[in-house]
Amino acid sequence: MDKIIKHLGELQNLVMAQAAAKGFGIRSEDIIVAEKVALIHSELSESYEAYKQNNLDGHDGFYEELGDVLQRVLHLAGTFAVTPKLSERSFERGQSTVETAVLFLHCQMSTVYEHFRRGRLAEFKAALAELPMVIYHVSDQFDFSIIKAVQDKLIINQDRDWQKEGKVNEKFVGNN
């Protein structure tokens, strides 16, 4: 498990480096937490939709979309200087369905945000620190590499244009 935490930490460093290069927020005051949480929930829903359509691997597939979830979680955590840690929350191989795993991740993300919303920063950071490992456990149960999914997405994102009309990196220009 220590090796996995090390890989998740290395991945977080890559995510944060790309965030800095693309002009994403890299400090908590640079982002809107509620927006980031909504985007994570959106990626979770996209992962489930891909699964329901039997699109597991490849563009917009279950693996890629769950990789997007992890990438966004690592980014959010990084803006608060939170690094991945071991989690007691796990899935036993063969004991969970994709539906229950995605629902569980939605609930975990909601719990993370509820701590933030209520000003319980220590609990927010602790729950956020465990989330990457929980996502890893889901990928392990369904026999794919979430680490590779995020690495692949980081490569795709290198050449992506993130500046959209009136927006920069999902955050409206001038809105703080």
Image (tube, helix red, strand yellow):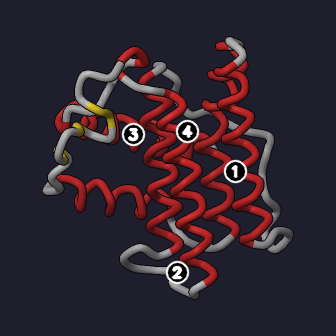
The residue at 22%/37% (across/down) is: 168
Q: Mark 3 points at which residue?
A: 10
Q: Mark 4 points at which residue?
A: 37
Residue 77 against residue 97 in the figure, above or below:
above
Element marked by disc 4: helix
Residue 123 against residue 70 in the figure, above or below:
above
Element marked by disc 3: helix
Left/right placement of residue 59 relative to residue 51 reads left
In the image, which disc is placed on residue 56? 2
Mark 3–mark 1 distance (CA, rounded to whole Å) = 25 Å
Mark 3–mark 2 distance (CA, rounded to whole Å) = 25 Å
Q: How crowded is mark 3: few (under 14 residues within 10 Å), some or many (20 or more)?
A: some
Mark 3–mark 4 distance (CA, rounded to whole Å) = 22 Å
Q: Name which of mark 1 and mark 2 comes first in the sequence.
A: 2
Q: Quadrant of the C terminus?
A: top left
Please state which of the two labelled residues, at mark 3 or mark 2, is closer to the viewer. 2
Mark 1–mark 2 distance (CA, rounded to whole Å) = 19 Å
Whether pointer 4 and pointer 2 mark residues with C-beta atoms closer than 8 Å, the reply is no
Q: Which amino acid does label 4 sit on?
A: Val
Kindly indicate the quadrant of the structure image that contains residue 19.
Answer: top left
Element marked by disc 1: helix
The residue at 82%/68% (across/down) is: 96
Q: How crowded is mark 2: few (under 14 residues within 10 Å), some or many (20 or more)?
A: some
Q: Which amino acid does label 2 sit on?
A: Leu
Q: Mark 1 points at which residue?
A: 106
Mark 4–mark 2 distance (CA, rounded to whole Å) = 24 Å
Q: Which amino acid does label 3 sit on?
A: Glu
Q: Where is residue 105 in the image (x, y as percent from the top left)?
A: 70, 51
Residue nearest the viewer, comparing 119 with 71: 119
